[in-house]
Amino acid sequence: MSVVVRKFAPILIFAIPGLFVVQSYYTGWASDISTTLISWPVTLAAFSVALGGATMLRYHLVAVARKGKGWEYSLLTLGSFFVVYFSAFAWKSIYDWVISNVTITLQVAFSGFFGFYNYTLFFRAARVRTWEVGLLVVSSILVMLWMAPIGEVLWVGFPIIGKWINDVPNGGTMRGILICVAIGMVGLFVRSCLGYEKASFGGE
Amino acid sequence: LIVQGRLFEFVLLIAGVALIVFSIRRAAGGKVPKIRRIVCLDALEQLVARAAEMGTAIHFATGASTLDSAEAPIIAAGLAVLGHVSELCGKYNVPIRYTCIYGYMIPLAQDIIKHGYAAAGVPDRYNDDMVVYAGDSQISYLAAMMGYISREKPASSMLFGGIKYETMNVLGAASIAGCMQAAGTPRLYYQPFLVACCDYSMIGDELYVAAAVVKKIPDELGSVQGQDLIKMIVIILAAVSVVLATAGSKLYAQLIGM
């Protein structure tokens, strides 16, 4: 592949459909094609699961072969992978049993664990390093006292202050940040179309 | 020609794109704008140097957002930071671990990290295992990151991109493990967590300009100036609309409805 093709092909593949979708949004012309174009990446992404599976297999096979730290877990991962993968084709009853009794159970257990973990995490991880963070923490507490029924029981002023923080400074700031984010997105799109931004195409 | 109700925003978009292109051309012509320092970007070297001193790896992630959604530009911006951090890792001889959730991110990340090490003059330090696939599930993704951080205790952890529910868990695990943390996202709901839990953070559109700022390429710096010009226009439009609405005029509402 020539250098020109290697350099410009990814930019064209990115820019032409991108500009087509933009024109379709504003003019309404060929909106069905635009919808199809938007759905393509989802289809392409589905194929990448195979790539992920291959990478995972290589990683854990190497780990088992080298017998490094924690290689037993790699063996367990490989065993689980092959059992689920082949049972999906050959032993449907085993596959259904694994999904219902192992996968879903583990997922629910993890979700429960992460939920409770999150409740306490903010208090463990947050550090008031600057006065801005101090302001954030105080605002968060006031908004929580507005949201939680106990706030009004403690003092009738908490719901009023909390609601004002949420509606006025928070609402205004969020809109301001949203506008900046949207402008930043336009800037990134223009830079990508002009070929300056190549990160999403891999290395330069 | 233009769909009803979208003419005004279309004109704004065209004006914005024209301003960005004009600023890029102006910077390419030698009038390079001065861009304020983004403290978080400057601090990335400090985070990598800390890992070098402690003899551990750097943990990096770009979040659970996908490249096939409207959040793709955020991931692209996060990957640009990954390229910069990889180069720093090459410079300080520090291994990097990138945990990815989607299969299609593997070759992308491998290529970016490989080029980062090559740019630092140490291509042999790179290996494919620096990119770890955690399965196409957010639960496995955050479990993989939390497990790695808890077990290996990397000196620094970085989270730049389209971060989602995994944010608090990863920040918390890294905080408990004593990692120095830097993170950035334009996603509104996660910005307070970053500010409260990280040593350095990027909010708003800072992540979008990060790539342009770290590379210090005049043309790209010009695009950042173009974005600032659009912001000024938006501020003026907002101020004018407030005055018009207060005076009872419906002109602004009619303009938006065109």
Image (cartoon, grey):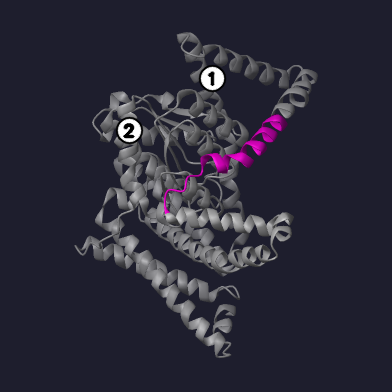
Tell me if residue A32 comes above or below residue B194 in the rendering. below
A36 sits to left or right of A153: left
On the rendered image, what quadrant is the C terminus of chain B found in? Answer: bottom right
Nearer to us in this view, B240 or A118 = A118
B137 sits to left or right of B159: right
Label the magenta part by its dominant secondary structure: helix
How many labels sit on residues?
2
Where residue B236 sits, quadrant-wise, is bottom left
Q: Name the residue under label 2.
A: B50
On the rendered image, what quadrant is the N terminus of chain B found in? Answer: bottom right
Q: What element carries label 2?
A: helix
Q: What element carries label 1?
A: helix
Residue extending farthest right: A93
Q: Is residue A196 visible?
A: no
Q: Mark 1 points at which residue?
A: A57
Decide: few, some or many residues near mark 2? Use Cα within 10 Å; few <14, some 14-19, many ≥20: many
What residue type is disc 2 on? Arg
Q: Is residue B200 visible?
A: yes
Residue A77 in picture, x, y percent from top left: 60, 18
Residues in magenta, as a range? A107-130
Q: Which residue is at 78% across, 26% downward?
A: A100
Q: Which residue is at 30% across, 55% downward?
A: B37
Residue B40 in picture, x, y percent from top left: 36, 48
Nearer to us in this view, A39 or B232 = B232
